Image (spheres, grey):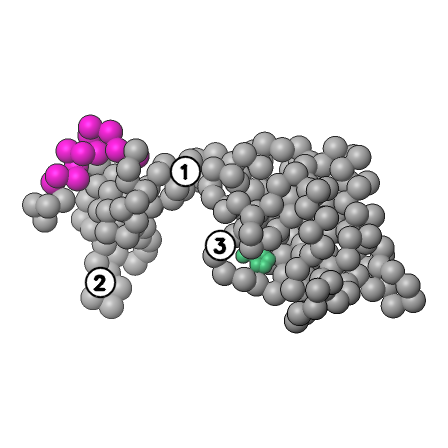
Amino acid sequence: MRIDVVTIFPELIEVPLRTSIIGRAVEAGVVEFGIHDLRAHGLGRHRSVDDEPYGGGAGMVMRPEPLFAAIEPLREAGAHVVLLDPAGERLTDALARHLAGVAHLALVCGRYEGIDERVRTVVDREVSIGDYVLTGGELPALVLIDAVVRLVPGTISQASHEGDSFASGMLEYPQYTRPESFRGLGVPPVLLSGNHGEVDRWRRREALRRTRERRPDLLEGALDDADRALLATLDDD
Ligand code: ADE
């Protein structure tokens, strides 16, 4: 997979992509990144990329020429172009899984108060990471990259993300590791029992409990008959 990023802050993007699991995926050749400094296409002596909004008002707007100049070669190379924008479609597990199947992504980071509307004509998709406004698209691009690259085969084991919250339509069950007792807090005995059938049942039941408590909206559609029976037993606790 190849992911290009267009930004006026390459330094904000570079370090996270060299770090941890994403950095390992790069070293393993699972994913290749290209970081493009939008200022290379900036206008005039100051390599300007923004200007005042027509019609007046606060803040600056990113001009179309530098963005078109950065985006067009990526489009011609076959990239699926994604603009990070608070007005975009919400990033979900399903969208991340879809994008993980795209061979070439180009992520365009907006900045300042906004981008010239005409830029939307050269992007394939607009994505928001949530209903809050950040100072630019760089952190959203990193969030999208992290969510997508971990799903690309070769980054982490398949088993590590099959049970993800949301992939299964449910939040994850509680996890414990050593020590068995910590500050008076124990570990549920079933997890120490060695009985895999019982462990699986307990985990499913606790995932159901947590999802019902915290995200009942996810439960619709995620339940089979066995789950409904397990849910009924929660009320006995
Ligand atoms: N740029 C600024 N805020 C954003 C958000 N929530 N999602 C995507 N891009 C953004």
Looking at this view, name the residue that lies furthest to the top: 225
Q: Which residue is mark 3?
A: 130
Q: Is residue 156 above or below residue 66?
A: above
Q: Residue at x 78, y 53 (%)?
A: 64
User: In the picture, residue 30 is in which quadrant?
Assistant: top right
- Looking at the rendering, the quadrant in which ligand 1 lies is bottom right
Q: Dots 1 and 2: beta carbons under 8 Å?
A: no
- Asked whether 192 or 86 is in front, the reply is 86
Classed neighbour count for the residue bearing mark 1: other residues with Cα under 10 Å, few (<14), some (14–19), many (≥20): some
As measured in the structure, the alpha-carbon distance from the residue carrying label 3 to the one carrying label 2 is 35 Å
Q: Which residues are magenta?
A: 222-233
Q: Position of residue 24 (x, y in %)?
A: 62, 46
Q: Quadrant of the N terminus?
A: top right
Residue type at mark 1 is Ala
As measured in the structure, the alpha-carbon distance from the residue carrying label 3 to the one carrying label 1 is 18 Å
Q: Which residue is mark 2?
A: 185
Tell me the chief SS of the magenta region: helix
